Amino acid sequence: MKKFLLLFIPLLCFAAFANAQKIGVVDTDYILSKLPQYKEAETRLNEQITNWQNEIQTLQTEFEKKKTTLENEKVLLIGDQLKLRQKEVDDLDKKIKGMINNRFGSMGEINNARSNLTKPFQDLIWGAIKTVSEKNTLGIVLDKSNNISVIFLDKRYDYTDKVLDLLLKNSPAKNTETEAKPAKRNLMEERTEKIRVMKAKGN
């Protein structure tokens, strides 16, 4: 009974605290996927990963070829010749394994690159969540992406779109796009003017 009370009382306190607070939920993974700057950075990272994979695959093909050739010619090699050829194969094998570990291992370049890629956007999202929370007087904000299982969510408690709208509104990409449109119109006007002048000369 005492154990039950020890468990029940903190839960009751938390429930009372939660009821006294206005709760909101956001999905930071969804927000990230909709940010143009993040998608561009992720595309560049994926291109780099593909280049690394191709580089390793090329070395792996070279290793298999050298290994097969060595196996076929081993009976013809003696002394230092055999040792030298075997060392070439072993060194290439070590190089490939080291490259895989350095780039694709748990502490490899890809994990570090992804962490560096995500962090500035996480800071931006956190700033936007803070602004939306203050504007809507939220006491608690949960992240659906952070290992939290949300079985049911009333739309009025989901502030994902509000956070995303705030980020896109302040996005420099949007300003760049807006500035690019007049330049496009000017180019079209120049072409129209050139056609008009050519027609006038033809007449």
Image: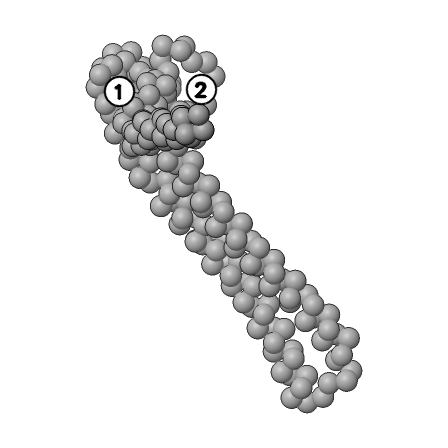
Q: Position of residue 202 (x, y in %)?
A: 45, 29
- Say whether residue 14 is left or right of residue 91: left
Mark-to-mark CA distance, 2 and 1: 21 Å
Residue 86 visible? The answer is yes
Q: Is residue 118 above or below residue 94?
A: above
Any mark on residue 132, and which? 1
Q: Which mark is residue 188?
A: none
Q: Give the percent coordinates (x, y) of residue 182.
A: 32, 27
> Element under label 2?
loop
Q: Residue at x 35, y 23 (%)?
A: 164
Residue under pointer 2? 150
Q: Nearer the viewer, residue 64 or 50?
A: 50
Q: Would residue 100 appear left or right of 80 to someone viewing this image?
A: left
The answer to whether the residues at label 2 and label 1 have Cβ atoms under 8 Å apart is no
Q: Work out whether residue 6 or residue 147 is closer to the camera in this orientation and state it.
A: 147
Q: Is the residue marked by circle 2 packed among few (<14), some (14-19), or many (20+) residues within 10 Å? A: few
Quadrant in which the C terminus appears: top left
Q: Amino acid at mark 1?
A: Val
Find residue 32 and report its horizontal and vertical position in percent. Answer: 39, 31
Other residues around mark 1 within 10 Å, as few (<14) / some (14–19) / many (≥20)? some
Q: Is residue 160 left or right of residue 149?
A: left
Residue drawn 33% across and 40% down?
A: 119
Residue displayed at 40% across by 50% down: 112
